[in-house]
Amino acid sequence: MFVSAAAFNDATLSWRIVHDAQQAHDHLAVEGKPPESLVRIQAEQLARVGDDREVDFVFEIPVRVAQEVVGFRHEEGASTWAFGVLRQVAPG
């Protein structure tokens, strides 16, 4: 399983959180300055690892951080999402 969440500011990476279970079941790579909620979410999810070895609780760390930043989970309410096309505008 692989999951990644990232934020950019003016086309520059602000932060990225990556979990790649093929590297290790507890793999978590963090770049930049992620939201402060990462520390809390990471502690909560890692505390659950002993509960069930069949569940990838580390996978939820980037997902939950992204959810707190954008206000929704990627798999919830997909049928009601509205997407717009972004186009680059000349500097003005």
Image: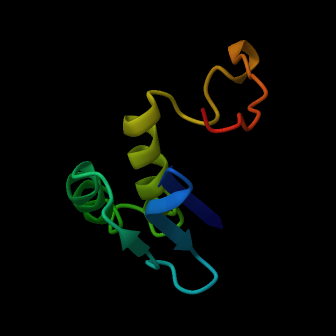
| Residue 45 coordinates in the image, percent (x, y) | 33, 57
Extreme residue in the bottom direction: 23
Extreme residue in the top direction: 80
Query: Which residue sits at x=28%, y=56%?
Result: 38
Query: Which residue sits at x=25%, y=54%?
Result: 44
Determine whether 21 is above or below 73 in the image: below
In the displayed structure, does residue 85 sit left or right of residue 60? right
Dividing the picture into quadrants, the one containing residue 1 is bottom right
| Residue 8 coordinates in the image, percent (x, y) | 50, 53
Determine whether 36 is above or below 88 in the image: below
Determine whether 40 is above or below 73 in the image: below
| Residue 90 coordinates in the image, percent (x, y) | 70, 37
Q: Camera-side residue: 16 or 84?
A: 84
| Residue 64 coordinates in the image, percent (x, y) | 42, 45
Q: Colour scheme used in the picture?
A: rainbow
Dividing the picture into quadrants, the one containing residue 85 is top right
Task: Give the quadrant of the C terminus.
Answer: top right
Q: Camera-side residue: 18 or 54?
A: 18
Dividing the picture into quadrants, the one containing residue 75 is top right
In the displayed structure, does residue 53 sit left or right of residue 91? left
Determine whether 8 is above or below 88 in the image: below
Number of numbered discs present? Answer: 0
Query: Which residue sits at x=64%, y=67%?
Result: 2
Q: Camera-side residue: 16 or 42?
A: 16
Extreme residue in the front direction: 92
Query: Which residue sits at x=54%, y=66%?
Result: 54
